[in-house]
């Protein structure tokens, strides 16, 4: 802000320029004139913002998200929603939009057959923009159908071998096969697999010992992901610090990767877009559930970890989740089963001890009776 200037009269004066408009403020104290100038600047900018159309407001919001470092995929999603989700509101000034207009726009999306999840995401973006540009607009009564909770499609242990066999038979031992290996046995997201380089993999095995049994392990350093943006694919850092992790994996997995990969730099060079139709082929060939995504293969890795007795914190660290609460939310079924096993073990232990104590007590009574 322009500094306040003291006038010969002893009063204080500030002159501001914003969007070509000059404003003058005068007060008895420097603090008061600065306060008035700040309020005036806010008022002028609110007037300018209120005169924008929703399309301009959405564009401004998206540009702010870009400057804040939002992921390319998020920017693409916001841009698509700006283009497709609110056609009847785009050219309307934000200060003329009513809560009823918002409700009608969202209801129309549902009538068009859009999923509840899609309409809810439309609403979250629109709400964020309107709160920024017209904060006094009351949107508290907007109603969106609740998104039904559905259980995560978890991988059955028996599917992993069938999937790998089918991939080898139908697509050969190449990058698609490597994708499946890394997703099943290292829990990598497809974007993380695509960014993985050989320099991120330990060159020699680490020897571990458990119950007098030796085994070989290797490490994968996960610190980037290759994601699609407006200008194609690019390598980015993980969205959260939890995405940076050092994973231990079976050395046999690394040996298999070295045997199959033809690349000297990145482990995988196949275009990520090629996964979709190849996975659809495998899913149909094996008769797997239609809703089972290739991404869901990493749940096999999570299931293996949970069944080993690992805690939710350990699972979160390996899966790259920011909190263990998120891991519990995603894999609640696994921990429910684990809790059931704990309950069963406690029941068996207490039941056995009680029966034994009763048996001992009865034998004692019989002995006293004989005496």
Image (cartoon, rainbow, N blue to C red):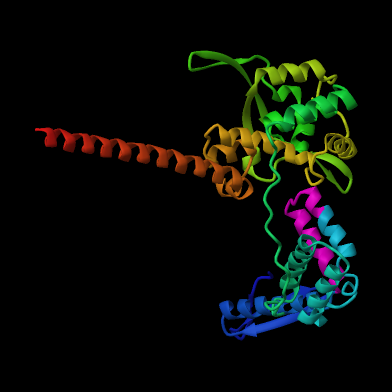
For the record, the magenta segment spans 53-75
187 relative to 271 in the view: left or right: left
Q: Position of residue 89 (x, y in %)?
A: 87, 74
Specify whether 90 is left or right of 369: right
Residue 3's image quarter?
bottom right
Q: Position of residue 162 (x, y in %)?
A: 77, 28
State how many labels appear. 0
Looking at the image, which residue is at 72% across and 80% down? 137
User: What is the quadrant of residue 364 in the picture?
Assistant: top left
Which quarter of the image is occupied by the N terminus? bottom right
* Residue 57 shows up from this direction: yes
Q: Residue at x 90, y 39 (%)?
A: 277
Left or right position of 362 against 244 = left
Spot the residue most to the left: 371
Q: Position of residue 294 (x, y in %)?
A: 79, 39
- Image point (46%, 41%), residue name: 344
**Residue 141 coordinates in the image, percent (x, y):** 69, 78
Side of 280 relative to 197 (left or right): right
For the residue pair 133 and 78, the one nearer the viewer reads as: 78
* Dominant secondary structure, magenta: helix
Vertical placement of residue 118 versus 273, above or below? below
Decide: is 250 above or below 24: above
Looking at the image, residue 182 lies above or below residue 213: below
* Between 32 and 324, the one nearer to me in the picture: 324
Residue lying furthest front: 370
Between 48 and 68, the one lying in front of the other is: 68
Residue at horizontal 72 percent and vertical 74 percent from the top: 143
In magenta stretch: residue 58: yes
Reply yes or no: does residue 74 show up in magenta.
Answer: yes
Residue 207 figure quarter: top right
């Amino acid at each position: 802000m322009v500094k306040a200037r003291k006038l010969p009269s002893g009063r204080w004066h500030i002159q501001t320029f914003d969007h070509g408009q000059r404003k003058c403020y005068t007060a008895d104290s420097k603090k008061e004139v600065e306060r008035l100038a700040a309020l005036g600047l806010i008022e002028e900018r609110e007037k300018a913002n209120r005169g924008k159309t929703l399309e301009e407001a959405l564009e401004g919001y998206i540009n702010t998200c870009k400057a804040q470092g939002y992921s390319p995929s998020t920017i693409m999603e916001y841009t698509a929603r700006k283009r497709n989700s609110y056609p009847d509101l785009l050219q309307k000034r934000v200060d003329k939009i009513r809560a009823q207009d918002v409700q009608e726009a969202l209801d129309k999306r549902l009538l068009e057959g859009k999923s509840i999840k899609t309409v809810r995401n439309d609403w979250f973006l629109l709400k964020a923009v309107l709160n920024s540009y017209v904060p006094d607009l009351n949107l508290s009564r907007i109603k969106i159908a609740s998104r039904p909770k559905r259980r995560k499609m978890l991988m059955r242990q028996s599917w992993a071998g069938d999937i790998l066999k089918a991939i080898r038979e139908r697509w050969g031992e190449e990058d698609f096969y490597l994708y499946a290996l890394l997703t099943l046995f290292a829990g990598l997201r497809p974007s993380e697999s695509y960014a993985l380089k050989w320099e991120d993999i330990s060159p020699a095995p680490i020897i571990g010992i458990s119950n007098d049994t030796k085994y070989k392990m290797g490490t994968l350093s996960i610190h980037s992901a290759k994601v699609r943006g407006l200008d194609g694919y690019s390598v980015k850092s993980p969205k959260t610090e939890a995405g940076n992790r050092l994973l231990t994996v079976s050395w046999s997995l690394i040996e298999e990767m070295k045997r199959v990969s033809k690349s000297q730099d990145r482990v995988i060079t196949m275009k990520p877009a090629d996964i979709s139709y190849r996975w659809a082929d495998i899913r149909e060939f094996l008769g797997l559930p239609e809703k089972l995504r290739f991404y869901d293969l990493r749940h096999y890795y999570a299931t293996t970890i949970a069944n080993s007795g690992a805690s939710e914190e350990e699972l979160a660290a390996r899966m790259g989740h920011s909190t263990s609460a998120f891991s519990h939310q995603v894999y609640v079924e696994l921990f429910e089963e684990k809790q059931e096993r704990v309950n069963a073990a406690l029941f068996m232990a207490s039941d056995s001890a009680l029966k034994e104590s009763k048996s001992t007590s009865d034998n004692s009574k019989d002995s006293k009776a004989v005496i």
